[in-house]
Image: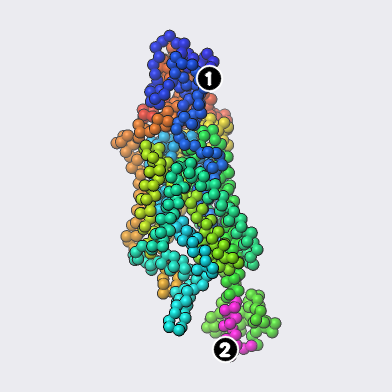
Amino acid sequence: MPKNTKVTQREHSTEPVTESVADLLSLEHPMDYKSSQMSMGLSPGSTAPGKALLPSPDPDAEDGRPAWNNKLEYILAQVGFSVGLGNVWRFPYLCQKNGGGAYLVPYFILLLLIGIPLFFLELAVGQRIRRGSIGVWNYVYPQLGGIGVSSLMVCGFVGLYYNVIIGWSIFYFFQSFQYPLPWAECPIQRNGTQAIVEPECEKSSATTYFWYRQTLNITSTIDDTGGLNWKMTLSLLVAWIMVCLAVIKGIQSSGKVMYFSSLFPYVVLFCFLVRGLLLKGAVDGIAHMFTPKLEKMLEPQVWREAATQVFFALGLGFGGVIAFSSYNKRDNNCHFDAALVSIINFVTSILATLVVFAVLGFKANVMNEKCVVENAEKILGYLNTGVLSRELIPPHINFSHLSTQDYAEMYGVIKTVKEDSFDQLGLDACVLEDELNKAVQGTGLAFIAFTEAMTHFPASPFWSVMFFFMLINLGLGSMIGTMTGITTPVLDAFKIRKEILCVVCCIIAFLLGLLFVQRSGNYFVTMFDDYSAGLPLTVVVILENISVAWIYGTKRFMQDLEDMLGFRPYAFYYYMWRYVSPAVLIVLITATVIEMAVSPAGYNAWVESEGSERFQSYPPWALAMAYALIIVAMLPLPIVYIVRQFNLVSDGSNKLSVSYRKGMMKDISNLEEQDEQRFILSKNPSEAPSPMPAHRAYLGPGGTQEMTNTNYGTSTKTGYQNIGSPESEL
């Protein structure tokens, strides 16, 4: 070690040596706080008095925090968390609804403006501070420590109903091992010697009937609970057992699971894409999907829905992103990770959209041909009864081989001639475009539209097994991230065995999840999906953005990133974090509140007598429950702010782990040189001038103005930097 270092000075000094506050707090030997700006564990070069200097081990290993086995496991975990069921059924629906290929333009723009920057921000703070969501935001700004608590609560709400969807997929998975598939045809009722089709099924369709009656056995209103559905209860139990086994050992077990659960869905999607492209009508579906309707880009609703989809597609605000990145090495290139995972997510959405609309194009052709056959039979009946004259039928039309073009020509002639009485004939136009325009989203796409299309596949049980196994894996990847977002902050704050915590959380979640496996449970799934996450998560993310960019300081954060990554991030991120992303999020929050105020609060109830859905408003108790979800999720934000702002309770820094406290004290390396020496050696600056060079200052985006802050480390709050001190922006 060079003789002019501080540790050497200390060894050769004739003055009494006093242990520093940092040494006592960290319960370790004295450390050279200047050796690593971003290190959160032991400092390289630390030594004990009277002993030979030895190289310090890897600080990432010494702080006792688990770590990913390799970079691939980590990337697969982030991909598995961000790529979920929404990529398969929400993105294609939004793309179809909002102008086809034109929707991709606002989506990609907003991915660049808010998606990648905020994803990078969460990755960086998790990796920098090496704690879950609660510990991270307690560290950045204690008054906004409620951000982490709100994230945890939203994770809990979402996990409760999200695992129910995995349970549905498990039920369909096991039902798929039959030929023909149980939802391929309507059930037949026997009345003596007479066989009749189930009336409810005949009014809807075989797949719709199987979903609402055989699977959910749904009630007609949310007021009628109907008792537990034992099939769904058992499926939910299996789903929670799977999740528990996947996360019981923390990242050591979930990392291994991700090898399969993250990669297998891509195998299935590519198989479906190849199979779908070989189906009749697949090209029609894809062409319809990506034919841009440019006028849609001028509608504010399209941009709002694109921003919301970007927001949820990357899992921002849930805490899972922060939790996963907290197990990284401190010098990991999280900037590369943010761009890679975001691009993979976007490409996956495009791939899933191609698959969905190739299959739905095939289904539309099948349904259109069925429509032509049914209406041709009606026309033949009218011809035989004399209602229609045979002179109306073009001579080249052959009813035994009737094409959609021939039917369209015949339909046009009849409509023109019989204009006055045409409506009484009850003929449908059978236009392929109308079938393609029937937008289906969410569970309806996966459990009704897609399952109906698969009944027409050759070897349909095989494709059904593959599809629902893919959904299970997509959901499992997201649930692992959600559970990690819950367990990591708790494990950081309390000394609990992760196995016990995991089992207890899963048992409690299963019991609470019984709400969703009642016969009316689907209505509660819709309620939680609409209210428990949207607005609270948006508020959480904008507070994350503000606490880093405006309270902690964008320049300070950029300096941290430069020290951590070894290079200075692009000035693009400076402007996004400081100005653009907060502005976009404010607009999104405003639009969401307006949408909630204008749109009637309700759900689509299944009407058994009609064999269809009908919109119903929530009863007062259900409406109160829906708004309570928003309030409960956001309540920690003001509560934590008030109690810490007025010092009503401790900020919790005295309960942090030893490694965490060491890490926080090491941030006092931001002190000026003489303050740092006084802190470490317990000397006045005049007694021992520092030979170390001053810490380099971060230059702003223009590179011409230094960021200087002589107030660092002067806060009176124990364990925290003076985060509230103003940064030099001018």
Count of numbered tags: 2
Q: Is residue 722 left or right of residue 472?
A: left
Task: Report helix, strand or loop for mark 1.
Answer: loop
> Which colour style is shown?
rainbow
The residue indicated by pointer 2 is 387
The residue indicated by pointer 1 is 693
Q: Is residue 388 at least partly visible in the picture?
A: no
Q: Is the magenta stretch mostly helix, strand or loop?
A: helix
- Range of magenta residues: 372-390
Q: Is residue 649 left or right of residue 426?
A: left
Q: What's the residue at 49%, 16% (across, down)?
A: 52
In this view, 192 is above or below 346 = below
Q: Does the magenta stretch include residue 437?
A: no
Q: Is residue 132 at least partly visible in the picture?
A: yes
Residue 716: percent from left, percent from top? 36, 28
In this view, 15 is above or below 342 = above
Calculate the distance from the C-alpha at mark 1 to the C-alpha at mark 2: 100 Å
In the image, 564 versus 557, the foreground residue is 564
Residue 563: percent from left, percent from top? 53, 30
Q: How crowded is mark 2: few (under 14 residues within 10 Å), some or many (20 or more)?
A: few
* Residue type at the position of mark 1: Pro
